[in-house]
Structure formats: structure tokens, C-alpha cells
Image: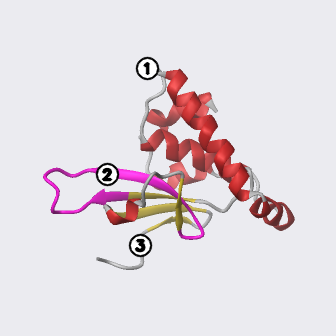
Amino acid sequence: MAVVATLVPLLVRQDLHRLQRWLEPPRPIAEDDRSAAQDTAQDTIVIVGRRIDGVIRRGKPIIRPGCLTRGITGYYFLRRAGLDVALCFGMGSARQASAVGHCWLVLDDEPLLERSDPRALYTEVARLSTRGVTAPSRVP
């Protein structure tokens, strides 16, 4: 887990399509494995989230804290656990003084491992998922 978290600054220098391909498991998750993973999804999400937080906390200054490290590392490991998560990238509203970005994980259209719903503060501009890189279907 620490290796993936350490590599995040290098990974995000790539375009989103290449990043998505690198983060996906090397072979598709079998349907049986995917349904079994969905049954234990909440436990898996909590465990992975705690481990990532611990790696980030213990890895400073080599591992950068923040949403990119949490999101990319979480996507990498949750996809390998068989969960159909997506990694969303958003920007703050025009009403804010400066442009602020954020990324977060989504499962079944609900944010994961977030203290509050980021969709209230950030407009989604891109999403990485098993379907590749997509833009939101609705424009605010």
C-alpha cells in the first residue's frame, strides 16, 4: 500500500486515460468474485480506508497527505478487492475566491470515506471507472 501511495505524485503527471489503465487490475474481475466482494463491501472499504490513513500518517514526508493520495490508493486497492468503485475529480464553485480541487471515491453513486458529501462543494469534472475516463452527463 505504501508503494502505491508513494508513487501518486508520479502517477498524476500522466493523462487521465493512462492513469485509469494503470490503476485497473491486470485482468477483469470475474462476476462471481465481484458479487462476493459487494457482499462484504462495507467491511472492505473500512479496512482499506483505515490502512491508507495509517500509511499516510506514518509515511510523511515521503508520502504526501491529501485527497489524491487517498483517492488513487483507495481506487487501486478497492478495484483489486473486486469493488466497482469510481474515482471522481471535482472543482470548487466559481463563488470561491480561488480554484480548489478535490477527488473522492464513489460506489453506487455515493461518496466513500468522506467526512461530508463533497458533491455539495465540488462540481465533478471527470471520473475514472471500469468504463474508462468519463465526463459528467449533466452540466450545472
Q: CA distance from mark 3 to mark 2?
A: 16 Å
Three-letter residue code for mark 2: Gly
Write down the residue under mark 3.
136
Residue 4 picture location, percent across and down: 59, 34
For the residue pair 9 and 101, the one nearer the viewer reads as: 101
Circle 2 packing at 10 Å, graded few (<14), some (14-19), many (20+), is some
Write down the residue under mark 1.
61
Span shown in magenta: 90-109
Residue 39 picture location, percent across and down: 79, 63
- In the image, residue 28 above or below residue 52: below
Q: Earlier in the sequence, mark 2 or mark 1?
A: 1
The residue at the point 48 percent across, 39 percent down is: 69
Are circles 3 and 2 on residues that touch, CB within 8 Å?
no
Residue 22 picture location, percent across and down: 60, 47
Write down the residue under mark 2.
101
Three-letter residue code for mark 3: Pro
- In the image, residue 36 above or below residue 16: below
In the drawing, does residue 18 fall left or right of residue 64?
right
Q: Earlier in the sequence, mark 3 or mark 2?
A: 2
Q: Residue most toward the bottom?
A: 138
**Secondary element at image label 2:** strand
Q: CA distance from mark 2 to mark 1?
A: 22 Å
In the drawing, does residue 105 fall left or right of residue 66?
right
Residue 32 part of the magenta-drawn span: no
